Image (tube, coloured by chain):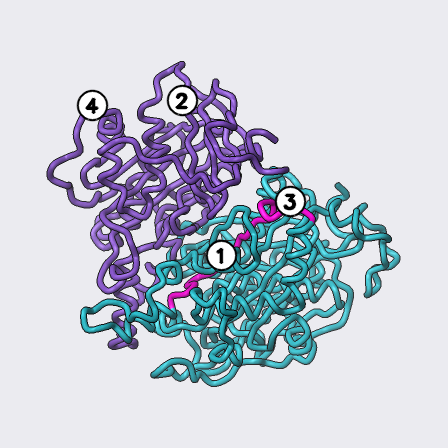
Chain colours: A cyan, B purple
Amino acid sequence: MPAPIVPLRIAAYTVTSAAGVGKAPLRAALSESRSALTANDFGPAPLPTWIGRVAGLESAALPKPLAAWDCRNNRLAWLGLNGDAFIDAVHAARERHGAARVAVVLGTSTSSIGATEDAYRHLDADGAFPADNRNPSVHTPHSLASFVQEALDLAGPSVTVSTACSSSAKVFATAERMIRLGLVDAAVVGGVDTLCGSVLFGFNALQLVSSEPCRPFDAERSGISIGEAAGFALLERADDARRRVPAVAPARHGGGGRPTAGRPAGLYLLGYGESSDAHHMSTPHPDGLGAERALDDALARAGIDAGAVDHINLHGTASAKNDEVEAALVARRFPATTHASSTKGVTGHTLGAAGIVEAAASLLAIEHGLRPGTVNTRVLDPACGPQVRIEAANAPVHVALSNSFGFGGNNCVLVFGDASAGGSR
Amino acid sequence: MSGGVRGGMLFVDGIAFWAPTLPGWPAARAAFRGEAAPLATPVKRPAPDILAPAERRRAPDTVALALEVAAAAVRDSGLDAATLPSVFTSAHGDLAVNDYMCSTLANEPTSISPTKFHNSVHNAAAGYWTMATGCHEASTALSAFDASFGAGLLEAATQCQADARAVLLVGVDVEAAGALASVTASTGLLACALVLSPRASERTVATFHWSLVGGKSGPTPIRSAAARSLAGNAMAGALPLFEAIAVAEPGQEAGAVALALAPSLSLVLVAKASAPVASTTAPALAS
């Protein structure tokens, strides 16, 4: 088992999804159990499915100095960075620590491949990319992190993590290690994925796409709804935050009386676990072996037991296999009091951005005592234990878990908490 | 801090290399030392025997190459593959699969092959590797354009140092295919792998201090004609380190090797027994 980590403070975070730009619209949609999915109208020949589409990207051009990076994914990244004044928080961190002391670690599954797909539809007479879509830095996975590093004027390590649907969960692990070793003092983590032909037609080819809005953990679920999203978080050491936060404020929902673990009020990354199924490229291990291993490592790094987990944001894609395996894992490992749900009925499965979107949903849960429901789901699969809930609830959340499982059997579990949660280091 | 931001020590306990004219580390090492020439006739891509025969034929080039060097490096280290976390890095992923995906989407999108789709994920090689070796440890797949090898080495060295565990690093890039070749600069096939360990062992072939150093001095240039012949591949950023390991003599001080990480940041490795020397590297970072 890995040793517990020193929790890192989430100094700022933001999320932009089909629900809207910034945290407030996602919080509202989760609170009202409202789906943001719409009938698929993406691309020249839309498949009959439902999508989580971010409105207005077509007209959201990048500022002139960044125009060479233009593509749907980087537009969404830029829109996302501007949510909740996240850019200002990063600029303040840059001032505090220096540009070279802030890493950029971002996850994506397909990055700017939509721009590459466009180029293939408009090849010139020689079979080459059209003149207006030839920036080599766009047609490559690292388009995302290199664009964001330039947009934020940072000069530390910059890397794009691309492990399919666990991508933007694993970025927390990479950043934690860099900060722990003192390579950097802060990290911008997160991820962006946009709708594109590759994922819509690719998941369709695997017969994983539903023709109706996805119904995670429903006995009659019929597949996923693909979405797009951008999300970011700024990670710093807790003691850096203590220097700036004058007093320990009581938590907003019932946490006032709880002893803190010696940290200032706020939101923290408590732990993470990463693992491999070693089973199949596109189907999870039938016994959830990899997922459980990631869970065990995450709990160990957080220094907590499963019983301390108030809420789980499940991977819950509404694919037959994922939900079956994940439901069984949750049923056997958590007490009935743990409130587990999937938010994919709200945002869609945002693939490489799912990790950060659901990290944001978990942080909203802690901040506002909001335990989301499983939207669109009518009758739970009998494999579900009492933990999986259709209805949202308002109750304090001190510790929240977020599950992200990807192709290639790539698993990541994140643990977030308030100042009272986790180890007292 | 005069040597930049200190990372730590790393011990190379396993090494592997593969290119069509330098198929294997012994051939590459000899060529980088100027003791032998690269093959005049390139060999076909490797068929790693850890894949089942059918997989061996069907695997995309990136997967075949990655598994070949991963298996060779782990064999060299004497460690059990199932115990090693892994870091796979590639600037562009499988460009032939991407070309297939984008061409098919442009022409007949509903005919996409499900297998090609799941092989199009950047972590395909990591997935096949963990399946082939029964490895349940963490695996990741990274990209950082021209700095992909440096970024992969940083992640692997960071994991090795932070969790005091041996880590497998694999770097692969392939030739640009189809219309992608009009924008993406990558020629030929190139794959390399290292097993990094947090402590010395009887298998250790090289030992480095590593650090992050700011400034725009750029990466260490390639020194041999043999390495220069591979410079068109997007993983060529790995070549200066493999050259340095090839030419190192026991007990002899080696110069620093700088690998690009970002436009103004390098990962600098200095062979053990020589202290980090600021004069051989870029201006130090304030830290």
Residue located at (29% from left, 67% from top):
B101
Residue located at (70% from left, 56% from top):
A11
Using the image as rendered, state which of residue B46 and residue A336 is in the foreground.
B46
- Judging from the image, mark 4 belongs to the subunit labelled B
Residue B97 falls left or right of residue A357? left
Placement of the C terminus of chain B among the 4 image quadrants:
top right
Q: Marks 3/2: CA distance?
A: 31 Å
> In this picture, which residue range is highlighted in magenta?
A96-113
Label annotation for residue A268: none
Residue located at (67% from left, 49% from top):
A236
Position of residue B214 measured from the top left corner of the image (x, y, whole percent): 53, 40
Placement of the N terminus of chain B among the 4 image quadrants:
top right
Choose the circle earlier in sequence order: 2 or 4: 4
Residue A44 falls left or right of residue A346? left
Q: Which residue is mark 2?
A: B254
Q: Which residue is mark 1?
A: A145
Q: Name above or below for residue A32 compared with residue B169.
A: below
Position of residue B195 measured from the top left corner of the image (x, y, whole percent): 41, 33
Using the image as rendered, state which of residue B104 and residue B220 is in the foreground.
B220
Q: Which residue is mark 3?
A: A185
- Secondary structure at numbered mark 4: loop
Position of residue B242 measured from the top left corner of the image (x, y, whole percent): 34, 32
